[in-house]
């Protein structure tokens, strides 16, 4: 008989702890939100050979999206038909970040490459975090090695649509020099509202 009471006491304690933990995670008492995962690719490039470009990609989700974490790689490609220069071709890097309705940031880490052009030495820039963006990378620049270098040529994007079933990836591209395409391969994990 004592074993039965002990078992019931242990089980009720476990159940109370479990429910309390879920209430802390979701104070409304609803079921814990589900996780949605997808792979997304974004290609950022100039518009028809110009020095700037912009665009938007849309991702439909099954329920309202609350927040997302993401990581992945990017690669430059300067073999387009209108621009056959080998400069800034096949540079690579990695990134990771977070986005929700009130904030977003990304940490970008370029790999070793000839960032100032093929006639200059290779450089491995340090990783840097960029607030208010979900994607951010600097393309090649002949002034990359100057002491007070300020990024001039960039590919960057933001994510919006939190609180809805549709995420928008809005990007801007600026490069008056070598103009490579930049392909972002994204592993996206989003927290969705309960059904």
Image (cartoon, rainbow, N blue to C red):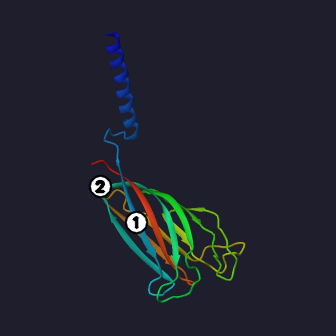
Instruction: Return the x and y of residue 42 as percentages of the image width and height.
Output: 43, 71
- The residue nearer to you, when weighing 58 against 14, is 14
Q: Secondary structure at mark 1?
A: strand
Instruction: Return the x and y of residue 33 as percentages of the image width and height.
Output: 34, 47
Residue 160 numbered mark, or none: none
Instruction: Return the x and y of residue 76 as percentages of the image width and height.
Output: 53, 76
- Residue drawn at 70 percent across, 76 percent down: 121
Q: Is residue 133 visible?
A: no
Read off the residue under disc 2: 63
Q: Does residue 71 appear left or right of residue 177 in this picture?
A: left
Q: Secondary structure at mark 2?
A: loop
Read off the residue under disc 1: 40
Quarter containing the N terminus: top left
- Residue drawn at 32 percent across, 58 percent down: 164
Quadrant assignment, res 176: bottom right
Decide: few, some or many residues near mark 1? Use Cα within 10 Å; few <14, some 14-19, many ≥20.
some
Decide: few, some or many residues near mark 2? Use Cα within 10 Å; few <14, some 14-19, many ≥20.
some
> Is 98 drawn above or below residue 152 in the view shown?
above
Q: Is residue 4 visible?
A: yes
């Amino acid at each position: 008989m004592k074993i039965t009471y002990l078992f019931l006491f242990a089980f009720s304690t476990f159940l109370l702890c479990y429910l309390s933990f879920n209430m802390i995670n979701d104070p409304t008492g609803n079921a814990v939100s589900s996780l949605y995962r997808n792979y997304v690719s974004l290609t950022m490039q100039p518009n028809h050979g110009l020095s700037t470009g912009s665009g938007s990609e849309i991702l439909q989700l099954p329920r309202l999206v609350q927040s997302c974490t993401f990581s992945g790689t990017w690669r430059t490609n300067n073999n387009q038909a209108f621009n056959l220069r080998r400069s800034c071709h096949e540079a690579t890097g990695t990134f990771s970040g977070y986005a929700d309705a009130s904030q977003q940031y990304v940490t970008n880490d370029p790999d070793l490459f000839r960032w100032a052009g093929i006639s200059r030495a290779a450089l491995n820039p340090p990783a840097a975090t960029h607030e208010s963006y979900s994607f951010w990378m600097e393309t090649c620049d002949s002034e990359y090695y100057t002491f007070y270098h300020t990024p001039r040529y960039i590919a960057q994007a933001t994510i919006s649509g939190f609180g809805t079933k549709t995420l928008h990836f809005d990007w801007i591209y600026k490069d008056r020099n070598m103009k490579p395409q930049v392909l972002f391969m994204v592993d996206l994990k989003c927290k969705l509202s309960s059904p």
